Amino acid sequence: MRDIDSDILAELIKSEFRPFFLFDKEIDSTHYRYTDCDVPIVFGGNTYTPLGFDIAGINYSSRNIVDSVDIHIDNLDSVMTSLFVGGTPQGSTVTLDLVLLDASYDIVGPASATIFEGTIDDWELDEEKLFETIVSIFSQWTQKTLSKHSASCRCKVFKGTECGYSGGGTWCDRTYARCQTLGNTDNFGGFRWLPSIVDKEIWWGRLRGES
């Protein structure tokens, strides 16, 4: 059984509660907090400034997990222009919460409800609005690495930046043995134990077959 806060129940009965969003994004280590309420909201010791924005679209994956959210933000005062044109917004963290206010604009209940957490993936800006696409923090799990594991060193340039070798040696065949001879194993870019596990059975748990 789930308990519902008594203050929330009271406002539900009176039909006087009003939901508002709290929008928090961190760009270049600075938090920018806004609300779609017409007055500032103080929550968690932070002030959320009134700003016009709307949730334009919520996209779900096949498992009904929110993958991304599109947010349209008013930019008539050009506040967002300097952040997005002169800053580095892509990849910045964003949190979208929901709070309930009573008729006196006081927050009802002990906490907010987090609607979405993610990072800025794409954006467009014009004189009137900022269009942001926020993707889930789990979206990076779907990305594929461009670097494959190899038993030999992946540093392709001998004495290059990744290799870091600056001694008198004139050649390297990218094996661990040669790297050891050159005294440069700290920079070895391969996985030298891979050949030893080829065609080996690998299991989880302390005992074979234990799940």
Image (cartoon, rainbow, N blue to C red):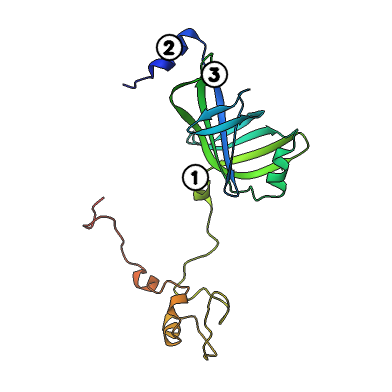
Q: Earlier in the sequence, mark 3 or mark 1?
A: 3
Which labelled disc corresponds to residue 10? Answer: 2
Q: Is residue 170 visible?
A: yes
Tell me residue 71's x, y (percent): 64, 34
Q: Is residue 61 visible?
A: no
Instruction: For mark 3, give the secondary structure.
Output: loop
Instruction: For mark 1, give the secondary structure.
Output: loop
Q: Name the residue at 49% across, 49% down.
A: 141
The answer to whether 194 is drawn above or below residue 116 in the figure is below
Q: Name the residue at 72% across, 47% down.
A: 85
Disc 1 marks which amino acid?
Answer: Phe
Query: Given this view, does label 2 or label 3 mark the residue nearer the observer?
Result: 3
Q: Which residue is mark 3?
A: 105
Disc 3 marks which amino acid?
Answer: Tyr
Disc 2 marks which amino acid?
Answer: Ala
* Mark 3 vs mark 1, CA separation in Å: 35 Å
The quarter of the rendered structure image containing the N terminus is top left
Q: Which residue is mark 1?
A: 138
> Which residue is nearer to you in this view: 16 or 178?
16
> Which residue is nearer to you in this view: 202 or 161?
161
Few, some or many residues within 10 Å of mark 1 (<14, 14–19, 20+): few
Hey, which quadrant is residue 131 in on the image? top right
